Image (tube, rainbow, N blue to C red):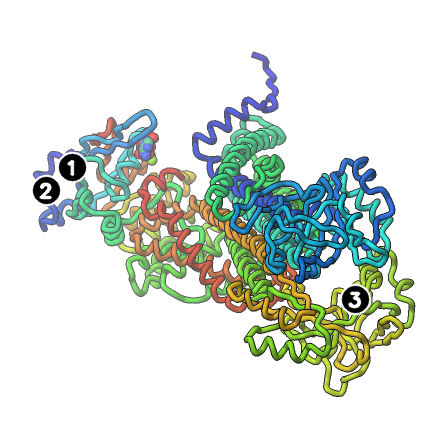
Amino acid sequence: MTGLNNVTILTPQTSSDQTTSILAARNLGKEVQAQQGIISILSGLDLDVNRGESVAILGASGAGKSTLLGLLAGLDTITSGEVLLNGQALSHLDEDKRAQVRSDSVGFVFQNFQLLPALTALENAMLPLELKGINNAEAEALQILERVGLASRVEHYPRQLSGGEQQRVAIARAFASRPQLLFADEPTGNLDQHTGEKIIDLLFQLNEEQHTTLILVTHDIRLAERCQRRLELTDGRLEPML
Amino acid sequence: MSTITTTRSPTVSLALKLLWREWRGGELRLLLIALMIAVTASCAVGFFTDRVERALVRQATEFLGADLVLRTSRAFPENLRAEATQRNLQYSEQLVFPSMLINGEKMLLSSVKVVDDHYPLKGEVKVSTGRDQVAKVIKQGPSSGELWLEPRVLESLNMEVGDSVELGASVFTVSQMLIQEPDRGGGLFSLQPRAMMHQSDIAATEVIQPGSRIRYRYLFNGSEADLEPFRDWLEERLKPGERILDIQRESPSLGTTLTRAQSYLNLSGLMAVIMAGIAIAMAARRYSERHYDTAALLRCFGQPQRHILKLYSLQLMMAGTLASAAGVGLGWMAQYILVELLSGLVPGTLPGPGLVPALVGFCTGMLVLAGFALPPLLRLSDVTPLRVLRRDLSPLPRSAWLVYGLSALLILMLLWAYSRDLKLTLVIAGIGSIGALILGVLAWILLRSLVRIPGPLAWRLASKNLLRHPRDSLSQLFAFGITLAAMALILIVRSDLLQSWQEQLPDQAPNNFLINIQPWQVEELEGYLDNKQIPHSGVYPMVRGRLSHINGQEAAKTIPEQSPGRRAISRELNLTWSDTLAADNRILEGRWWQPEDQGKPYISLERDLARDLGVGIGDKLRFSFGDRSVESEIISLRSLDWGSLRPNFYVIYPPGALEGLPANFITSFYLPNDRSAELNQLIQQFPTLTLLEVDRLLAQIRSIIEQVSIAVEYVLMFVLAAGITVLFAALATSIDERLQEGALLRTLGGNSKTLRRMLGLEFLLMGALAGILAALLDEAVSFWLYQQLFKLEYNPNLALWLWSPLAGAALVGCSGLLGTRKVIKQSPLKVLREL
Ligand SMILES: Nc1ncnc2c1ncn2[C@@H]1O[C@H](COP(=O)(O)OP(=O)(O)O)[C@@H](O)[C@H]1O
Ligand SMILES: [Mg+2]
């Protein structure tokens, strides 16, 4: 079941789309300017993700997984094609509008955690809520930090936390704003196996609790197994894995 | 393949190859550009100030007539011509004496200058053959048989060029009109209308008789190296009443102007170097931090510490050589453009650019690089190879005292080389390090308290950011603070200096002196001047007296031979009495006369003379006036402004104290040029008075001041440019972190408005804090500078405390936002990927 088979032509912001497909890519292409000339990383890529689904994206290093994730989340500009996030065509939005979309419906977890070193665990987790302008940011953030098991470390700075703890703060930060979509780029890549498993458990638990749609980039086959769908990125396109 | 491989020490060519890669990769660009700007700025300042300085010295020595002048009232016994020739010095001699010029009924007292074939040693003479003729510039004086007269002499005597005039026992035909002579200096009282003649005619005039008032001037030109021992040789042979003159001592107002200008230019050079150093230190730190990984990798590959050290030092040295050379070239061009721009304003021609500033600029570049860039680079060799596995392992600073001590020493040397003033260097270094300590603590407290202030998200993020790496924030704060302080200091000093120069020569500075006023003429003269509405400085009595005893001891025995006070006791001083204090005089200690002091033997003494004589309030000075002497008690010390061109006196008595002593009076007044016809009426009314016109002296001083002012303005621009460089270098040091943070915030949904607000606030805060530090620093430094270096009155600058934080906030805020545009513009994915 590739994306192509599922969907007819989508027009932005129809109510039927919003109920079925939360994220779609149409004939997506990305080229970058390098010293040797223009390289094409993605081309003619299609994807459809339904609400509440969990999708794993696998692929060799350098295949373009991070690039794809960035385009899907509106972190980078599209060369050709279109990405529809919640029915919104991202290529028509400027950077501030895309930020608005992210703020409303997207969460992130990175391989290298990406916490702000100047802020405590609590402040890091509060950040997306504050950027959204939510009033009881602190209470919400505390609650979710408790949920990830860091109630006693809320006043600690990232440098005072272990890798696993930092990633848990990052997960708390991602879920704090109750996003409809969560992107995770190799979330266990920097962690040992044991810690990695715990992080995965946490991700899927929260996924269930909040009915979040999960897009996961990983090398880890066991992590991929837990997703409902597995896609492989090769030659700039996505193919279903059996 | 051998089983044991030893790593080779890095070679120059390897370092060069790596250097090229670094440059291509953009890693070294910031550091090298900072260095190049530093050398360019300091070179341009160096070249330009060197040229202007040499022009000023040249003009000033022209004013004096030679590099060194010996002035005596009797012919010098030794054969100075032979001595000078043997010592490789140019030599010329002059006699100056007052004499009457007579044309039939008309007579005029003039100052006759007798010159030899070598006149003038410096500068040029301007002459013409008639009032309507074009003036000629020549480099010689009158030949045997010629007499040259100033236009006003011709006018007063009703003569033309070609007419005959009597001088003593001779009759001369006037062959030229003397428009301008270069060496017009030598004090106000030499400014009687000039007549000039040749040495060979002097005997025939028979004016030189025993007891004639003749001044001998012996002039010497040569290199400082030749002059120095000669000055010593002369000094050993000086008798009372004989003086050696050089530019610094000759004309007080010219001397201080020149000294202050030099101090200012040097100060500017110094500031440019300090700021450049800061920029380089910041760039080097960033470079070094970005190379921890490379260094760790090299260590992993088996390079020993010292190889890494050598590799990076080699790279640094080569980069420094290239950048410094480029900077010298650019600086050389910059000063040409500068001089070109100024060609209409800079009077006369500047001497060509010297080699010394190029050398100094180059060495400055290398030294600044070593002093400021070495410490952070040394840390590279301390990177543990374990860092390849654990990135958070940053090297600890190695024995910090040693490293920073070394660079502090280098910096001190540089400061010294630039200021040419050890005291200035030590004071700046001292104030700098003590100030840095205090300010550091202060800034830290300020930063901490900022975080406690609640506010919107942007505010909290901004203040937290400042606190995150306290050492980084503090060092940026210092960089901004010192830069702002340097710029503000140069600005403040500039306007105060210009103002003091303007005040020194107010538009209505007296341009005429009247001397030889007899006591019975005073009232009539004052009435006349008031009636004609000619404002004057007051009519002062003048009594000539010799200081004979200090506190009962013979003055000649208490004041040592070599001391400066000797000058005051080896000649007669002009004393006066007055019941009011002149406007340019200030009582520093003691008190001015009360009515009951009338007639008491009290004196008010000028402070420099008091210092030279080693006396103060309550000490007693005995002055002898012919056969009478007066034991006088010092009851006040005064400062006065010799540059004001008013009659000024070292010693003032209360009225009545010098009753019965022979006195004549002196006054000065200002008369605009278009009223100069009234001078003739004045002279007809009071034929026995001697009138001295000092317009020309004033014009000469004014032109020097204008020239200096222009130089000051332009040097200021270089300092400001150097300051802006620091701002951007400092910004660049933190750009990586800011990019990361900005990308992350945007990933989390922050929009550009929030980001801009956060960055803006951070820089505004930083700028305002730096402005406060700058104000503090400036008050401390300028307090000392004004008192010691510029000898100007110091007033705390309250406005500074307001505009320094404001200007800091505006400057750092704007350049900060400008320098971090990328944070808002760049694709967040690109940034996150590059980490
Ligand atoms: N801005 C860029 N400039 C040059 N090459 C890029 C750029 N972005 C991505 N690439 C290249 O595209 C390829 C895909 O990168 P990436 O998406 O990070 O791969 P993955 O995450 O699957 O390992 C890599 O070969 C990378 O070097
Ligand atoms: Mg990747």
Q: Which percent across, then down, holds residue B515? A: 69, 68
Q: Secondary structure at mark 3?
A: strand
Mark 2 lies within 8 Å of ligand 1 (Cβ measured): no
Distance Cα–Cα, label 3 vs label 1: 103 Å
In this rendering, which labeled residue sits more in front, label 3 or label 1?
3
Q: Is disc 2 in the same subunit as disc 3?
A: no
Please state if A84 lies on the left or on the right of B534 as rendered. Answer: left
What residue do we see at 84% from left, 63% from top? B569
Can you tell me whether the CB of the residue at mark 1 lies under 8 Å from the nearest atom of ligand 1?
no
- The chain containing the residue under callout 2 comes to A
Horizontal and vertical percent position of residue A210: 25, 53
Residue at 67 percent of width and 69 percent of height:
B687
Position of the C terminus of chain B by quadrant? top left
Q: Which residue is mark 1?
A: A26
Chain letter for the residue marked with disc 1 in the picture: A
Q: Which residue is mark 3?
A: B573
Indicate whether B469 appears above or below B652: above
Residue A8: percent from the left, percent from the top?
A: 8, 38
Circles 1, 2 touching at the beta carbon (< 8 Å): yes
**Kind of residue indicated by mark 1:** Arg
Q: What's the distance in space between the residues labelled 1 and 2, CA to CA?
A: 9 Å
Number of labels in the image equals: 3
Q: Alpha-carbon neighbours of circle 1 within 10 Å: few (<14), some, or many (≥20)?
A: some
